[in-house]
Amino acid sequence: MGREVFSRYEKKYLLTEAQYQSISSVIADHIDLDAFNREHGLYTICNIYYDTPDDQLIRKSLSKPVYKEKLRLRSYGVPASCDRGYLEIKKKFKGKVYKRRTPIIIEEADSLAREGILPSNKELCNLQVLDEIAFFVSRYDLKAKAYIAYDRLAFGQDDLRVTFDTNIRTRRKELSLPLGDHGERLLDDDLWLMEVKVSQSMPLWLSELLSAEHVFSQSFSKYGREYINSVSGSKKTVTEDLPLSDPREYIYRTIPLQMQRKGA
């Protein structure tokens, strides 16, 4: 959890419970389980996403541009205001993800993101990343827009990291990490979001495993899905006309129509 600079490709997959059980058991035979998972089971990641009053960043992201960027504040578990979190700037250019983050006190991170106020004590921070985030903040009028949390199982070894997220919950009120871990479910109870993160190509054994399980990558963003639900006014986690048996068909096929209806 201490790494601060990432450059990699990320592939996302929606899995049924049965697919998760099958795939995760095989992955466990090839790469190591995250040390925290070995000791404590699933761990919780909590995030605050920042955006402009008119949701400029997520609307641009959903239009599938060549370049996109976003800012979020992350903690592992529910922190106090004086605890350490991570302020992260995440960019994607031509399919490759660049993530840079700095350790920072939670209340100081929120002041920086919303008001551009630099931390009073910078000893904790990665100063290069802090400068980059400060420049990002100076370009936008940012507000805390969404809370998104989930429980994660992670595997990692050398260049490869595979994560499985479940119980993804969101809210648009009480947008502060210390206010607790609660929200509405983003996906159905028996769905998992798998992410494969690698700087080069996926290993052959993993490609063959996903093919054998009939699992295919798709475009999926937790914040993007949350935003679509919020503008459509829908509390449903899947579209009415798509079968639960095929997670590949979820989410983005109906985005343009939903957004047009709300003028997004």
Image: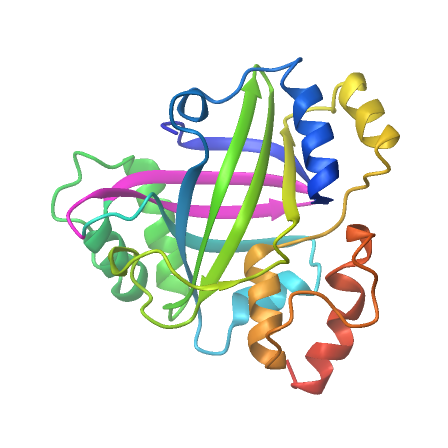
- Which residue is at 62% across, 78% downward? 234
Q: Is residue 86 magenta?
A: yes
Q: Main secondary structure of the magenta part?
A: strand
Q: Position of residue 11 (x, y in %)?
A: 70, 39
Task: Name the spot of residue 93 as percent of width and height, x first.
Answer: 64, 46
In this picture, residue 68 sits left or right of residue 182:
right
Q: Nearer the viewer, residue 10 or 112?
A: 10
Q: Position of residue 126 (x, y in %)?
A: 29, 35
Q: Is residue 231 above or below residue 39?
A: below
How many marks the image carries: the answer is 0
Per the rendered image, the range of residues in magenta is 81-104
Is residue 213 left or right of 133 when viewed as pictured?
Answer: right
Compared across the picture, whether 84 is left or right of 9 comes to left
Residue 254 image position (x, y, % from top left): 78, 70
Q: Residue at x 56, y 46 (%)?
A: 166
Outermost residue to the left: 120
Residue at coordinates 55% horizontally, 15% vertically from top-left?
A: 32
Residue appearing at x 40%, y 32% in the figure: 4
Q: Quadrant of residue 251?
A: bottom right
Quarter of the rendering containing residue 71 = bottom left
Color theme of the render:
rainbow
**Front in this rendered view, residue 234 or 71:** 234
Residue 259 magenta:
no
Judge whether 187 appears above or below 121 on screen. Answer: below
In this rendered view, identify the residue nearer to me: 185 or 70. Answer: 185
For the C terminus, the quadrant is: bottom right
